[in-house]
Image: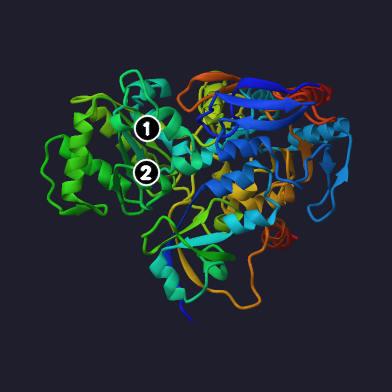
Amino acid sequence: MAKELIKNVVCPFCGSACDDIEVEVEDGKILNVYNACSVGTATFFPQPGVKRFKKPLWREKKTDDFQEIEWETALDKAAEILTNAKRPLMFGWCETSCETMRMGTKVAELTQSIMDSQITHCHGPTFQAIQMVGEPTCTLGEIKNRADVVVYWGCNPLNGHPRHLSRYSSFPRGFFREEGRLGRKLIVVDPRYSDTAKAADHYYKVNLGEDYLLFNALRAVVNGVELEQEEIAGVKKEDIVNLAEMMKKAAFGIVFFGMGLTHSLGKSQNIAGAIQLVQLLNGPSKWSIMPLCGHYNVNGFAQVMSWTAGFPYSVDFCRGAPRYNPGEYTSIDMLQKGLIDAMFVISADPGSHMPQRAVEHMVKIPLIVSEMHPTSTTQLANLILPATVNGIEAAGTCYRMDGVPLHMTKVVDPPKGLFESDTVMMKKLYEKVLARQEED
Amino acid sequence: MVKLNIRLTSGGTINQGQVTKSGGKSLPMYTKHVGSIFLDKDDFNKLQVFPMTPVKVRSEFNEVIVYAQISADGPHPGVGFIPRGPWCNLLVDPYTYSSGCPMFKDTPVTVEPADSHEKPLNMPELMKKYYIEKAA
């Protein structure tokens, strides 16, 4: 078969969801990936020697060896575990399509589960802040064409979103920014002199966990207040005044922020401080703010949950109607308190990314994991359901970090023995759960 | 023996992302890139060890052996960085302050050179030792 170059592929890695990827395919195999960053390219090419799950695996005890089982048996077992549980948790989703999430929500409603995603331990506090004070935002296209001052606060996109600067914010030539990088100021605020900070025009080294102080100091200066201290949060008074002046004089400014704000003390209050600063700057100038979402469909999960349940994440279907209360129904809190009695994980690795107290409880309960390759979570699983890679082996919808929906194309067929998409797998699971409940 | 008292922070790195996205969590490269603590140069020198020497990092919640490396993002005296993964999450403060999100960016830890026979466990060994065997 001749080589084929598939264009306009959406990258299934980060929230930038670059949609200019080109993939060269021959005989159902990927030969080359063009335009993607190094992490995006790695998503298309598994490491040599890495095992790909192609048949469901089961073990009764976590100390046993896994045995291969048929899909029919595996889905029966999954349905049995979720149906018998009193407080099941369905976690993950940010690396699946919106269609898969929708089907997962149906399963969660039937089994009265908590439906939660990686949002809970990344941008959860961001959503809480947005619910408190709103969010003046825009699209990445507007930033590319208009922004002359770009601030990255508590994030390192050159590592986490490698093409973000070159494609959307700092380097590209835009309609009103014909000079590209030369026509924009790049500002980084971070406790570490990160790779992004090294590329910046202005770097402000804030003390670890003191971002909230700096936001309030900036708000005070923008409001015309004379600062009394010579240094706030590790930043000198004159630097704070200069930063505030730069922000006020911007034609179009954007604040991108990341885990530096959500993972340190203050959490949602840090982000509320950032949003309120941006709201204030919309007096003398025009400013927007945007969270840097880690996975390509973080925003998609919030969208799907918002239109199906009315809340963005950590939705509890236990009572039949959706409930939402961060700190109570959020996955890590529920796991640490030992309140979850069965867990379904899809395209996520809480074994690696949750703190030890939560993982310790995952060992004690039946754990179903839908995954492509071995991860920390599959090490703790009872049942492994092989996953199909959305955006490479299956088509679907994702939402970019700015809330723009994109259609992800299929590039190659999934390995033999796998479902054509995770949506189909979730639909089969839904049917199994429904049949089991009708029997009862 | 020297023991550093520092604040631990964590997060994604490009190496961690590449290994993770290419399914390599069970490979030695995951241990190398993610099972490492990146220290400020002056802090690192106080330990009197070579780069990639195993060190013991201890928090209120657990202790783990990781490689010590010099941070390229310094100076950040008093702050150590372990990339997001199972090694750092053995140590982080799990308290969420009712936000659902633990203190991934700020946990007090101590760092000291490990005993000569100790070395970082790879991911499958680590999950077995710290979680499965502990629960059994």
Cβ–Cβ under 8 Å for marks 2 and 1: yes
- Where A312 falls versus B77 (above or below)? above
The alpha-carbon separation of the residues under discs 2 and 1 comes to: 10 Å
Q: How many numbered badges does the structure rendering display? A: 2
Circle 2: element type: loop
Q: Quadrant of the N terminus of chain A?
A: top right
- Where A189 falls versus A231 (above or below)? above
Q: How is the image coloured?
A: rainbow
Q: Which mark is residue A364?
A: none
Quadrant for residue B64, please give it. Answer: bottom right
Mark closer to the chain start, 2 or 1: 1
Q: Which mark is residue A199?
A: 2
Q: Amino acid at mark 2?
A: Ala
Chain letter for the residue marked with disc 2 in the picture: A
Q: Quadrant of the C terminus of chain A?
A: top right
Q: Amino acid at mark 1?
A: Ser
* Residue B80 place in picture, x, y as percent: 45, 61
Front residue of A363 and A44: A44
Q: Which mark is residue A170?
A: 1
